Amino acid sequence: MQKKNQTEELNSVFNKLMGDYKTLRHSLDDIYNQSQNIRVLSFNSAIEAARAGQAGSGFKVISEEIRNISEKNDAGSKTCNVVVDHIEKKMYDLIGIRTADVAFDIIDKIDRNLFERYCDVQAWASFSRIIEACTNPSEGTYKSAENVLERMVKIYEVYHDAILTDINGNVICAGIRKELRGANFSNKEWFKSVCAERKTVYSDMYYSASRKTWAVAYTCPVIAPDGSVAGVLSTRFNWQYILNIVDMSKISAHGEICVVNSEGAVIASRNKADILKRNLSSTEAFQQILSGTPYGYCYIKNAGTAFTVYGYAHTNGYNSYPGKNWSVIIREEY
């Protein structure tokens, strides 16, 4: 709650800062316009003084004084504008850094969460009952391993399911969807990759037609006591938990948070209609990520004093989990 309040206070500070800046800019513009009006008045007064001859000499002195005041106002106005332009640049930088920091914080939370999922499947694959079901196949060992998977899925709460296959890709256990037993997944990329690489693999985020929702698959080889691959354990992580991280992140009411994959496709957003439908690969922020800049910001000046800032951060992975080349891009408008 404290962090939430601090974030909201920071947003309020930035919004007030923008409001003060706009007021100052408008005031300087008004001063400049008035100075120009004074200069025109001085010029007209000089013309009338010249027409009046000797009788207008006093008026000519006043006209010159008005012109001098106008020139001094112009010089002061130019100095103020230089200072305000400098403040504007620093203000944009400050807001950009803050926006990039929020993006970094979000991708870091996602990486930490997915690191745990990466560890889960490896830990479960080492359970004795899982190994026994693959090395000593029988209805008894299958049932025992299936009870373990069902219990783990329900305890952890972040998974749609966990399935165990034998070395031929036949499902011998399913934590939740028992009807999957007997199905063959030997043609699935996750199964072939694990068997070929003998290491944990994980998919990009995808839409599961059977579950009618988004998921990520984490798959690990089950290693027999002799060191051979005896089976494959695969979990289905519920992507809603990543969407919750995005939804809970505090940005302005007009802001936007998108998690994108390595191709720029949106895989998480507050606007669920964007997921796997929208692509940000053409944005400057994504292009900077592609160029090798893992963290930063850019901004676009709009009409008047309004501007749009983009903060971005690319995954660093977490510990042994290298990440999936995902990034977070945040758009804020001021």
Image (cartoon, rainbow, N blue to C red):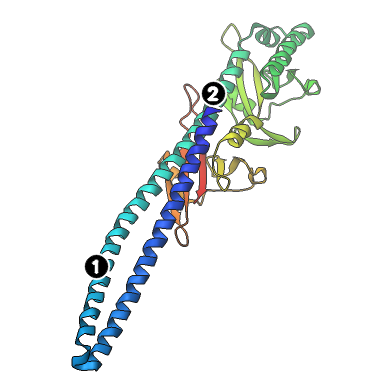
* Residue 116 image-quadrant placement: top right
Residue 129, image x, y percentages: 68, 7
Q: Which mark is residue 72?
A: 1
- Mark 2 surroundings within 10 Å by alpha-carbon count, few (fewer than 14), some (14 through 19), many (20 or more): some
List the single residue furthest toward the right.
179
Residue 291 seen: no
Q: Which residue is drawn at 30% across and 63% down?
A: 77
Q: Left or right: 3 with respect to 85? A: right
Residue 253 seen: yes
Circle 2 SS class? helix
* Residue 53 image-quadrant placement: bottom left
Q: Residue at x 37, y 70 (%)?
A: 33
Amino acid found under the numbered disc labelled 1: Lys
According to the picture, the residue beneath numbered tag 2 turns out to be 115
Amino acid found under the numbered disc labelled 2: Phe
Circle 1 SS class? helix
